[in-house]
Image: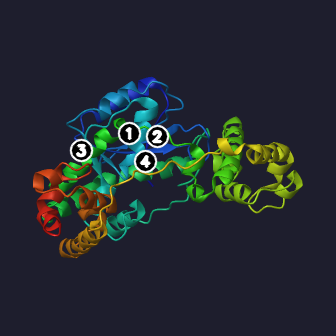
Amino acid sequence: MAEFELITRPEALSKCAAQLGGSDVIALDTEASSFHRYKEKVCLVQLSTRDRTFLVDPLAIVDLKPLKELLAMPAMEVVIHDADYDLRILAKYHGIRVENVFDTLVAAELLNEPEIGLASLLGKYQGLQVDKKFQKADWSKRPLPADMLAYAAGDTSHLIALRDQLKEKLIAKDRWSWAEEEFNLLTDAPFNLPVDDEPGFLKIKGAKLLKPHQLAILREVHAFREAIAEKLDRAPFMVLGNEPLLALATDPPKSAREIGSRKGIGEKLVQRHGRELMAAVQRGLDLPKEEWPRVPKGKRWNRDEDYDERLKRLKQVRDRLTTDFDLRMGIVASNQLLADIARTLPGDLDALAALPGMRRYQVQHFGQDILKVL
């Protein structure tokens, strides 16, 4: 079991940051409340050197300036597994930018590891058995029990050693420059997120297949769920799942009593909010046709009879390169990137390199083969 120091006071955080500031590499992880709470928060930040672990409580320490300054140091490498989410929530809620990232998940992908979860990698490379029993725990509760704190400490205490092993393999395969390119992109990503103005009800899987009059009901019952979830500060799916929402939209009930017989709708919800839910369904049913929501149409392309054939050839060369280099398909080129190539017809490597999402290593190692099939 990993030993750790719990940081709950500002002066302790300043001291911790000063100690860690002398390290050339530290490991980082976060625990958040999004699985249980409507209002997402960073609930714990785990930091490890090669021999020490600190657990910082952001619910007890409002000002994380010492941590912000520490993680912005370009000379210090910060090791994270699957960094995207951690970097986004640290940026969103605390304005923290991690300047120098090593993502062990990305490293594992570049090495074409068959299992890229942290538990699997620690098992393979360090012979550790990781218990993930608190993976979906409510980290916003206080006080956190000792076994949850120990679990959290374990998430970072072995990360640096894993990083050492993965980096050695990346260098041996001549893919370290690939990793550096991917890691550098991670640093900027949380600060360059595209504006997302798509309504929440359209993000539900299957929603865009509904007809406009069904979308009208879905929009109302989704708004009902959001209001209840926000009031209770519970994750929306814990109030009412997506499948029952879709079922209410595609097969609307005739009464609040009928709602109680629907699969996935709890008795407590019906008792407390059944009439409100039925009223939401009715609002959707009563909405005039001209006010029905509609799914925005995707971008239209000029007719190109050879596009499908070019895309087919591109996927074939991608499959061959995947085998030749022992890589995942997405590392050679994602489906979206291949589609962009097939439509824009780059004429040379410079034009290929200019496409959004194209990496330098992809151009260098796969570019000529891709251009040939165009």
Per the model, the C-alpha gap separating discs 4 and 3 is 31 Å
Q: Nearer the viewer, residue 129 or 79?
A: 79
The amino acid type, in three-letter code, at marker 3 is: Asn
User: What separation in Å lies between label 2 and label 3 (alpha carbons)?
Assistant: 23 Å
Residue beneath disc 2: 196
Q: Nearer the viewer, mark 4 or mark 1?
A: 1
Between the residue at mark 4 and the residue at mark 1, the CA separation in whole angstroms equals 37 Å
Q: Which mark is residue 193?
A: 1
First along the sequence among labels 1 and 3: 3
Q: How many marks?
A: 4
Q: Looking at the image, is 318 positioned above or below residue 73?
A: below
Q: Residues within 10 Å of mark 2 (few under 14, many from 20)?
A: few
Looking at the rendered structure, the kind of residue marked 4 is Glu
Work out how far the residue at label 1 is from the one at label 3, CA to CA, in angstroms: 15 Å
Q: Position of residue 291 (x, y in %)?
A: 66, 41
Residue picked out by circle 3: 184
Query: Dot 4 corresponds to which residue?
Result: 3
Give whichever of 156, 327 is nearer the camera.
Answer: 327
Above or below: residue 6 compared with residue 161 = above
Residue plotted at (38% across, 50% down): 156
- C-alpha separation, residue under disc 1 versus residue under disc 2: 8 Å
Visible residue check, residue 223: yes
- In this picture, residue 277 sits left or right of residue 336: right
- The amino acid type, in three-letter code, at marker 2 is Asp
Image quarter hosting the N terminus: bottom left
Q: Are marks 1 and 3 in contact (CB under 8 Å)?
A: no
Q: Residues within 10 Å of mark 3 (few under 14, many from 20)?
A: some
The crowding category of the residue bearing disc 4, from other C-alpha atoms within 10 Å (few below 14, some 14 to 19, many at least 20), is few
Q: Secondary structure at mark 3?
A: helix
> Disc 4 on helix, strand or loop?
loop
